[in-house]
Image (cartoon, rainbow, N blue to C red):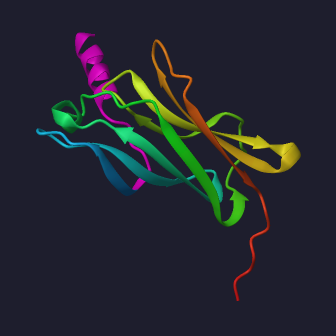
Amino acid sequence: MRAAKGLGGLLLALPLWVGAEEIGQVSTVFKWVGPNDRIVVEAFDDPKVDGVTCYLSRAKTGGVKGGLGLAEDRAEASIACRQVGPIRFAAELKDGEEVFKERTSLVFKTMQVVRFFDRKRNTLVYLVYSDRVIEGSPQNAVTAIPILPWPARP
């Protein structure tokens, strides 16, 4: 039983696998030891909506703790999602469905992107926010994509 609990705790400590691609980064605070604090820009495609790519910018903590993956990243993030091709739904969409999630501390804090479908306006809405096991953050950002016909290429 103890071994199972220990293995469960170890699995919680591992970073979540995410399908985000780093586009670039800038340093914000110089650190003498370990990586600098920085802002990272990442891109990921919506797994259930072909033709949509989201760009997420967020703070990453540097220093010794940040370099070892032990630091807690800040809750601030910005998101911009864009139609990059014809939009096709690969599966049925559920409001508030998670499309991206990444751990921003060793165990308790995550940054998430969820999707909503505004049927009345035929628009996809993406919300990024950070949460913790005990207490989340009200800081968030939102972006919307009206579903438009994609021009055919010659």
Q: Give percent across and percent down for residue 34.
A: 15, 40
Q: Give percent across and percent down for residue 130.
A: 49, 29
Residue at horizontal 52 percent and vertical 43 percent from the top? 78
Outermost front residue:
29
Outermost bottom residue:
154
Residue at horizontal 71 percent and vertical 37 percent from the top? 94
Residue 14 highlighted magenta (yes or no): yes
Of residues 115 and 10, which is closer to you in this image? 115
Of residues 63 and 111, which is closer to you in this image? 63
Q: Is residue 20 visible?
A: no
Residue at horizontal 85 percent and vertical 48 percent from the top? 121
Q: Quadrant of the C terminus?
A: bottom right
Judged left or right of residue 104, residue 137 is: right
Residue at horizontal 41 percent and vertical 25 percent from the top? 109
Judged left or right of residue 74, residue 48 is: right
Please report the bounds of the magenta region as a residue range. 1-22
Identify whether 53 is placed above or below 39. below
Q: Give percent across and percent down for residue 120.
A: 88, 44
Q: Give percent across and percent down for residue 97.
A: 64, 36
